[in-house]
Amino acid sequence: MRKPVSPGTTNDDRTRLAPGLRYAWEGIVHVLRTQYNARVHVGAAIVVLLAAIALRLSALELALVIVCIVSVIVTEMINTVVESIVDLVTSSYHPLAKIAKDVAAGAVLVSAGGSVLVGLLVMVPHLWHLLHG
């Protein structure tokens, strides 16, 4: 178990942060390399962020959009974790393995769907004003 970092922590304890960050980065890269849907979500996120900048969203509106983007990517990563663990535990069909994978995929769908709704609520008024200003 890791020791908590406190003001009196030595440099040796602080150097433990670097490997943790490296492992986290490797996890992100793994998801992007191996999961098609994660790449689709990142591509959509880039398009949405460019649109948000072009539409000059307020800081609060941009924050909502970013929270939605992060939630979709995080649920996609958790879905990858669930699928990997299920595949590690069993190579044969099991109804509980199916439920675990289906629920994890459903979480991504719910997150993405909610994010689309928030995006529409935030961006459509700006688009409407731009087109009918």
Image (cartoon, grey):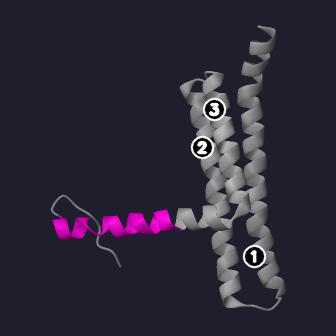
**How many numbered markers are drawn?**
3
Please give the range of residues in magenta. Answer: 9-26
Kind of element beneath mark 1: helix
Kind of element beneath mark 2: helix
**Mark 1 and mark 2 in contact (Cβ < 8 Å)?**
no
Q: What residue is drawn where x is 69% and y is 65%?
A: 35
Residue underneath mark 3: 50
Q: Earlier in the sequence, mark 2 or mark 3?
A: 3
Residue underneath mark 2: 67
Give whichever of 13, 18 is nearer the camera.
18
Kind of element beneath mark 3: helix
Q: Earlier in the sequence, mark 2 or mark 1?
A: 2
Which quadrant of the view contains residue 81?
bottom right
Rendered image: mark on residue 100: 1
Marks 2 and 1, how far apart at CA:
25 Å
Closest to the camera, between mark 2 and mark 3, is: 3
Asked if residue 17 lies left or right of residue 116, the reply is: left
Marks 2 and 3, how far apart at CA:
15 Å
Q: Earlier in the sequence, mark 1 or mark 3?
A: 3
Looking at the picture, which amino acid does disc 2 mark?
A: Val
